[in-house]
Amino acid sequence: MNIDKKLEIFKKAIKILKNAGADYVDIYYQNGKSFNAHLEENKIESTSFSISEGVGIRVIKNFKVYFGYTNDIDNTLKVCNSLKESLKENKNITLNFIKKELPLENYYYDFEIEIPLERKIEILKTVNDEIRKKYKKIIQVTASLSDGISNIIILNSEGEIVFDKRPFVLFKVLCVAKNVNNLQTGYESLAIRGGYKSLSLENFLEKGFKAAKRAELLLTAKEAPAGKFPVVLASEAGGTIIHEAVGHGLEADLVFQNMSVYKNKLGEKVAKDFITVIDDGTLKGYFGTTAFDDEGTPTQKTVLIENGILKGFMIDKFWSFKLKEDKEFLSKISLTEAEKEFIKNISSTGNGRRQSFSHVPIPRMRNTFIAPGKDNPEDIIKDTKKGILVLKMGGGEVNTVTGDFMFEVNEAYMIENGKITYPIKGASLIGNGPKILMEIDALGNDLHFIPGICGKDGQGVPVTDGVPTLRIPSITIGGTA
């Protein structure tokens, strides 16, 4: 079925649902293909190709969401008529559709996904071979290479049509090092919104060597001490803390359902004066970037915290509708004067995201980071008499209602008299996100981003998180020494 025929069906479905009384309707069409190869034990264990196509239809009526989807475009009107049964009105509405366009080359590096299979396999094999040549204590290399491209069409009952074309490449590598009975691991990933034209073999090798080096280094690491210490979080450690302990708490659905520590804090000081937190969906080639969000809103740069003051939240269309017009809901929640003023001019910040056509969009982060400060990262370490330098964060958990968190540390070192001394292992950071933002006493002029997949409400979406080098004067370290 050609594009014009699909658009004709989608427009008809929207008109049917609007005439049946829907307050708002949008249709999300996705057509994509993807590839994955997995290497383990010195050989390619598997390769797979997949093609997907489907359409999701969302209806909003009296601030309730009705949703249906199908992977057969011919069934679009059947899904539409099923949703229509929930509305039971009869109107006669005329809709005119206007195409909204953006220069996609401003958001994605390139679209070259279709390179020979042999070249993709060669990347994995070369990384494996070169790691084993260079790092003699590595006994296992596990690596995967994925890529794909999705063609997206979004239509809504406001008469908007948008087209997006989203490429990606994702590479993961895990190395295991052994010394007698001591086993340690190192992990790295590379991810871009682009294709292979923007990558070289050296990009993949760099990540592989970094993972192997970390695994070997940990063989000599001492057990981490437990207690309260100053912590210097290097920019290359990744923005796990800002993403988990702060970012989720600034998503509108959590805020206004009283599931965020930042409820009632709008307009107030929530961080040091030199702290600015930004979510930006427009950074070219970053893993969390798209030209439009999954509701058809152009992505944008959203300043969440500016010079320590909470300025706003990440919002999708549903929550912008609900907060402006759902009088019953508003009557049941307490709002500060600052929140009431904020709601008067509320609109989507381009943060409506979904995993696929079979999921409902919700407020999500994209590329979230603390803006760089003025301090030299080396000077921050020199100015730390005794503490811990974190070079790689691991996974963890956070309570968005309180801001309390616990994160594993994958690579860290002791700092003694302003110098990096020996590596430590088995450390974890235990603290509170809002408290840390008020205590950071040094902020580097560098900034580094780490890609990942963010999970929320059972959906995973690509994101990137970043921080400059920063120092927390005192935080609890979970250790074993």
Image: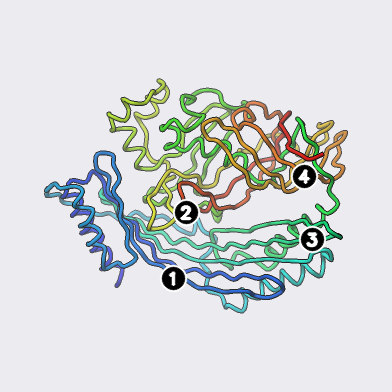
- In the picture, measured across the screen, residue 198 lies left or right of residue 333, that is right
Which mark, by number, is residue 412?
4
- Nearest to viewer (mark 3 / mark 1): 3
The amino acid on which the numbered mark 2 sits, given as a three-letter code, is Thr
Label 4 residue SS? strand
Q: Are marks 4 and 2 in contact (CB under 8 Å)?
A: no
In the image shown, does 15 or 94 lie closer to the viewer?
15
Residue with the mark numbered 2:
290
Above-or-below relation of 124 to 422: below
N-terminal label among 3 and 2: 3
Q: CA distance from mark 3 to mark 2?
A: 38 Å
Label 3 residue SS? strand
Q: Position of residue 227 (x, y in %)?
A: 77, 31
Q: Residue at x 54, y 59 (%)?
A: 193
Q: Are marks 1 and 4 in contact (CB under 8 Å)?
A: no
Above-or-below relation of 340 to 288: above
- In the picture, measured across the screen, residue 431 lies left or right of residue 257, that is right
Label 1 residue SS? strand
Residue with the mark numbered 3:
177
Q: Residue at x 43, y 36 (%)?
A: 252
Q: CA distance from mark 2 to mark 1?
A: 20 Å
N-terminal label among 2 and 1: 1
Q: Residues within 10 Å of mark 2 (few under 14, many from 20)?
A: many
The amino acid on which the numbered mark 4 sits, given as a three-letter code, is Ala
The quadrant the C terminus occupies is top right
Residue 325: quarter of image: top left
The amino acid on which the numbered mark 3 sits, given as a three-letter code, is Ala
